[in-house]
Structure formats: C-alpha cells, structure tokens
C-alpha cells in the first residue's frame, strides 16, 4: 500500500537560538514545524532585547510564554504542541550537554 505524502518522513534542520537541530518529522508537518521554529526565534530575540540573560534562560522564558499562551487560548492543536515539545526537548538536551 502506498503511503501518502503526509505520511512520508523528512529529515529537516531547524535553527533555534543560532543552533541547528536535526528533526525527523512527517512531510505534512514541515510547514508547522518551521513556523514554530520561526516563532520561537522571534520570542527569543524579544527576550534578549529586554533581559540580560543567557541563552538557556531566554529559551526557558520563551517556552513558558508559549505554554501560557497555549493554555490561555485553549489551543488543542496536538500536532503543533507535540512538535514544539519535541523541539524544546532537543534544545534542552543540547544545552544540558553544553553545560556539562
């Protein structure tokens, strides 16, 4: 049985806070994942302009703001939420490796 284009897995690279993260995602989710990365980068830049904080703190504040926004709006888009959480997990893992 042939798989649809949306089921095809892609290997993409998403740049967040000047670091590149390889992700394996469904082709149908590529635009959403890239938009999430772009939104995260914009939020990071906003926090960097306001606060004198390191990248890890800025990432944590950005993640918190997205979580609050998601809860306020009642956003139940699990695909975007799952991809965002996966991206944050990858970022946290990389930051933990750098810190040790």
Image: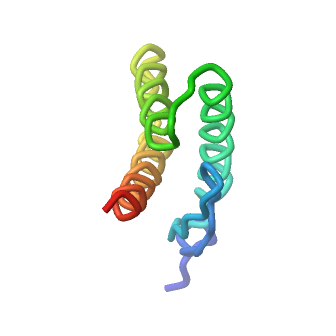
Query: Residue, x 42% and y 20% (percent of image)?
Result: 68
x and y, in percent, of residue 44 in the image: 60, 35
Q: Position of residue 88 (x, y in %)?
A: 43, 49
Name the residue at 68% across, 25% down: 49
Q: Eyeballing the image, is 7 above or below 49?
A: below
Q: Which residue is nearer to you in this view: 53 or 41?
A: 53
The total number of labels drawn is 0
The way the protein has been coloured in the rendering is rainbow
Quarter of image, res 63: top left
Q: Single out the residue that lies furthest toward the top.
A: 72
Up the image or down, 79 lies above or below 99; here it is: above
Question: Percent from the top left, x then y, of residue 2?
Answer: 55, 83
Which of the two residues, 88 or 79, is positioned nearer the viewer here?
A: 88
Seen at 36% across and 57% down, the residue is: 99
Q: Position of residue 35 (x, y in %)?
A: 67, 45
**Which residue is more in the foreground, 13 or 99?**
99
Indicate whether 53 appears above or below 7.
Answer: above
User: Which residue in the rendered view is the most extreme toward the bottom?
Assistant: 1
Image quadrant where one finds the C terminus: bottom left
Q: Is residue 7 left or right of residue 56?
A: right
């Amino acid at each position: 049985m042939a798989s649809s284009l949306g089921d095809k897995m892609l290997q993409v690279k998403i740049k967040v806070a000047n670091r590149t993260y390889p992700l394996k995602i469904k082709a149908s989710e590529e635009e959403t994942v890239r938009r999430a990365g772009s939104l995260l980068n914009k939020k990071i830049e906003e926090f960097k302009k306001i606060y004198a904080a390191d990248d890890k703190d800025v990432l944590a504040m950005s993640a918190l703001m997205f979580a609050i926004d998601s809860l306020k709006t009642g956003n139940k888009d699990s695909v975007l939420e799952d991809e965002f959480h996966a991206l944050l997990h990858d970022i946290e893992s990389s930051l933990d490796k750098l810190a040790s």
